[in-house]
Image: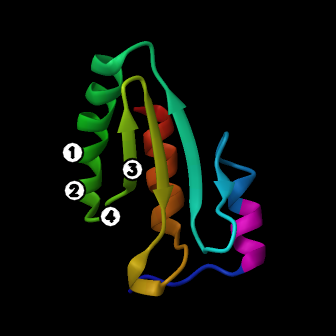
Amino acid sequence: MVEKLTGTQIETLLRNVDGWAKVKDREAIYKHFQFPDFVSAFSWMTRVAMVAEKMDHHPEWFNVYDRVEVTLATHEVEGLSQRDFELARLMDAA
């Protein structure tokens, strides 16, 4: 069972993921990723998609040329869970 994080837990976990921020007016986290070109951005998205599928936890993302904007939230709890921060760390490492 997935548990919804508290505000204090979210603030603590945000300190451990570089560049991620809380979304205003929504229980979600956000990060802008910049790449050298479209192929690099799309290759990264493909790698992340494979990991996300295995986790059964899918990002909300938007790609234009060399940038990808990502929002993570756990719909099951209508907020944030550990799964969001796990996927954020995996995205940073991909």
Disc 4 marks a residue whose amino acid type is His
Part of the protein shown in magenta: 7-12
State yes or no: discs 2 and 1 in contact (Cβ < 8 Å): yes
Left or right, residue 53 beside residue 84:
left
Q: Is residue 83 above or below residue 8?
A: above
Q: Earlier in the sequence, mark 4 or mark 1?
A: 1
Count residues near mark 2 (Cα–Cα under 10 Å), then give few for <14, some for 14-19, many for 20+: few
Disc 3 marks a residue whose amino acid type is Trp
**What is the quadrant of residue 31 in the picture?**
top right
Out of 61 and 86, give the one closest to the viewer: 61
**What is the quadrant of residue 79 in the picture?**
bottom right
Q: In front of the other: label 1 or label 3?
A: 3
Q: CA distance from mark 2 to mark 3?
A: 17 Å
Q: What residue is shown at x 60% (from left), y 74% (from top)?
A: 27
Q: What residue is shown at x 39% (from left), y 50% (from top)?
A: 61
Residue at label 2?
54
Out of 64 and 85, give the one closest to the viewer: 64
Number of marks in the image?
4
Disc 2 marks a residue whose amino acid type is Lys
State yes or no: discs 4 and 1 in contact (Cβ < 8 Å): no
Q: Main secondary structure of the magenta part?
A: helix
Residue at label 4?
57
Residue at label 3?
61
Count residues near mark 1 (Cα–Cα under 10 Å), then give few for <14, some for 14-19, many for 20+: few
Residue at label 1?
50
